[in-house]
Amino acid sequence: MASHGIRDRVAIVGMGCTPFREHWDKSLDDLLIDAAGLAFDSAGVTKDDLDAYWFGTSQSAASGISLATPLRLSGKPVTRVENYCATGSEALRQACYAVASGAYDSAMAIGAEKVKDGGYQGLNAFPIPTDGTNRTLTAAAMYSLILPAYAERYGVDEDELRRVVARIAEKNHYNGARNPLAQFRRETSAEAICEMPAVAGRLSVFDCAGVADGAAAAIVVRAEEAHRYTDRPLYVKALSLVAGDSSGLIDPDYDFTTLPECAAAATDAYAQAGITDPRAELALAEVHDCFTPTELVLMEDLGFSEPGTAWRDVLDGTFDLDGDLPVNTDGGLKSFGHPVGASGLRMHYEAWIQLRDRAPEERRVDLRGRTKALIHNLGGYPGEMLSFVGIVGSELD
Amino acid sequence: MTETMGILAYGAHVPYRRLDRAAISDVMGSGGGQGWRSVASFDQDTTTMGVEAARQALAATDLDPEALWFSTVAPAYLDKTNATTVHAALRLDAAASALDLGGAVRSSVGALRSALTGPGRTLVVSSDLRVGLPTSADESLGGDAAAAVLTGSAADGPLLAEYLGGASATAEFLDRWRTPGDVTSRTWEERFGEEAYRPLVEQAWAAALADVGLAADDIDTAIVTGLHGRAVKRLGGRLGVAVADDLIDTVGNSGAAHPALLLADALDTADAGRVVALVVLADGVEVLVFRSTDALAAGRPSRSVAAQVEDRADVAYPTYLAWRGLLEVQPPNRPAPNRISASASLRRSDWKHGFVGSKDATTGTTHLPPSRVGIGGGAVDDMEPAPMADTEGTIVTFTVDRLAYSPSPPIVFAVVDFDGGGRMPIELTDVDPAEVAVGGRVAMTFRRLHSADGIHNYFWKARPVRG
């Protein structure tokens, strides 16, 4: 299988991200107009300057018309994309490929989700007619299966492991408390999280991503044109997507301690970007912390920790804001909530400001000469998952 | 020459849950009594209980029914046949007809008599779910259960019990009635019914003895049952025959299911050559006389009635009320499931109703649900059916979901590896979250997951195998 990548052929030259909130006073259209406007301003362009648009939303709207109408885009190719919780990253991936192909000179990827108009807590899949035999478990419960499996495989005490994942939530809330775009801006201690009642397996509400409305957008152009728009573009080093075949739910060899689709996407992305030692080469990583156990095993699947050792690295502070490899420096899904279509682009937004020294002082990563960031965005469940891994960098290789 | 007709196989289902009758008066200040009644779980109805009883019966024989008669007075559907659901869960041949015989409690014993006197192999399934208003006698004395009897002739295979004959007496009188749409029954004063039944019992009993050419002394055991408890007790005691335990103390009276349930219980323990008379008081009296055979000992189902009576756990009275819809409790703040698709359900009926996966003919990997393309390579449509309903499995990992929608939260969910291959994450039922452990053993059971738009969503769950 060939995966050649488009390293350094496309650059991000503008981005925008709305605050992620319970936006009772904003519609999907409002969020799209706000995020697009921030991105246009960031790149110094107007809507008419861009050649094509990709709009990622999971359940809030359908078709390109639902972006073309609020922005009043006239005569443009506008495509709606959907790929579970990786929808935002998928929109960016499509826009980048379109520009890299030469079909267009410029494009916007925009993702948005209006979750809070549904009247229920949590994300709810929209109903596809079925024979009624589908699993009805919540995502929280599916991800809760990781903890006992990991504890068993690596001989970690279950109570200890519970504290480890609470520590992940503590870290992400620490970072989110320093981010004005985040929804939850209060620090929370691991001890307090451990004392909360369980809602799924041993997970408490604070082991789960919140729910929010939000939108984010990126403008991409051919790399050689980037400096026409900004002095500090971000170059796209890798874009990888792996959709699993759900064999983890059928195959008795799958043990719920790893997310193989994420590991495969990471391997592909590192090859595209020419990265051989991600822990040493990456300045930061934004990963899909939908539930705290997810971030734990991602540290291993993304190659940041050896299998069975991430729990120790978490306790050692390796992934803290001032750690060896800061992870989820913007606060992650834990602090932002998860407007499905927007989250992937929100993660890229953090790389956009950190690698270009635009992050607020109180959570600015010490880059130590490192110029690349990893963005990981997944959809689905352990055993039945798709994963995006992207790498961006502030320098041409 | 007429072949001897009789019972080729039988089985019963007593639900796992019990209501301690004392719990009723603890909450309500009245009602209740002593002992326990059986309680269908929130995910059971008469159809699913009927499936479990029928699976017990058919697992004990190689014979296929040529017809399926399903009798209940608490049908999951009207207009639509419920027997077809049982038929699908049992994976019977399309040529085997499936009929509902309902409306009155008497229908179930009538179905049994008709099957025993008609040609062919007929699986008679009776099932009932008895509901009474809180503190009523029907609430505490009722029970939920199902039983199945495969009837046929000696030419079909060894009979476990021969049908010797019987008699019937019929009269029109108002003892117990329910208008369509009502959940509970109403009754006339007790004394009237007892007197109305008295001559009918005498008439039918005498006629039955004459029909089989036996004297009362030749009858080893009489099973006497009916929803008029006082008449059953008083009039049964006058037959001059030892009367079998009626399971009222441990199961309650399971109405339409009770005659076959008690018959199954009797056959579970009867020696060869015992004569058993089934006497059913229901708008008249039906008497059926059987004699057990040498084949009985080898033909019993794997789970006796007594074993199922023992395998139990109490349900709290308010929970019971909520399960029956008599107490409305706040559901989780999640959308309730949508109705299922009729066409999708038909396409996948083998999976949905029969729990038939597929097995890759090349790699041997079992796929649950069935798949046209296998994992790990191989050709398209290189699959064989993999019936898994009777395969037990082991819990690999599990979780308790307190967020997901369920008619009775929380959901206990386990990843199950089936013996001989095949894995599936599946909901557990009849389970206390605290008893679930990795390595625990489970068996499959047919359940109703939820209902929406008047459509019941039937599928399989796993239940712990205990003891």
Image (cartoon, grey):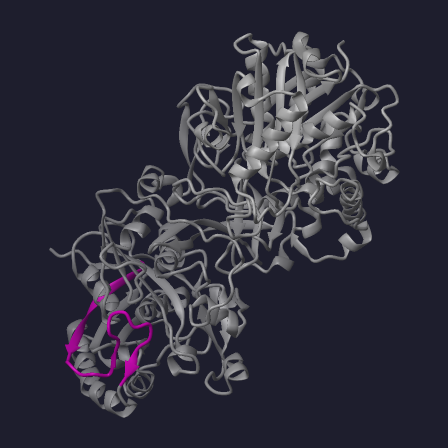
Q: Is residue A10 left or right of residue A231?
A: left
Residue A317 higher or lower than B362, as above or below: below
Q: Tell me where residue B91 appears, x and y as whole percent.
A: 33, 44
Res. A7 visible in picture: no
Q: How many numbered marks appear?
A: 0
Residue bounds of the magenta highlight: B160-187
Residue B444 higher or lower than B309, as above or below: above
Q: Is residue B461 left or right of residue B113?
A: right
Res. B361 visible in picture: yes
Q: Tell me the quarter of the picture where residue A101 sits.
A: top right
Quadrant containing the N terminus of chain B in the rendered view: bottom left
For the view shown, which residue lies furthest in the bottom direction? B191
- Residue at figure coordinates x 31%, y 44% from the top left: B342
Quadrant containing the C terminus of chain B in the rendered view: bottom right
- Residue at figure coordinates x 24%, y 74% from the top left: B179
* Residue A78 is a magenta residue: no
Camera-side residue: B337 or A170? A170
* Residue B176 is a magenta residue: yes
Q: Tell me where residue B17 appears, x and y as whole percent.
A: 50, 66
Camera-side residue: A182 or A229? A229
For the view shown, which residue lies furthest in the left direction? B1
Residue A126 higher or lower than A8, as above or below: below
Q: Tell me where residue B452 appears, x and y as whole percent.
A: 38, 54
Q: Tell me where residue A381 appears, x and y as whole percent.
A: 59, 37
Camera-side residue: B332 or B413? B332
Q: Is residue B389 left or right of residue B403?
A: left
Q: Tell me the quarter of the picture where residue A230 sits.
A: top right
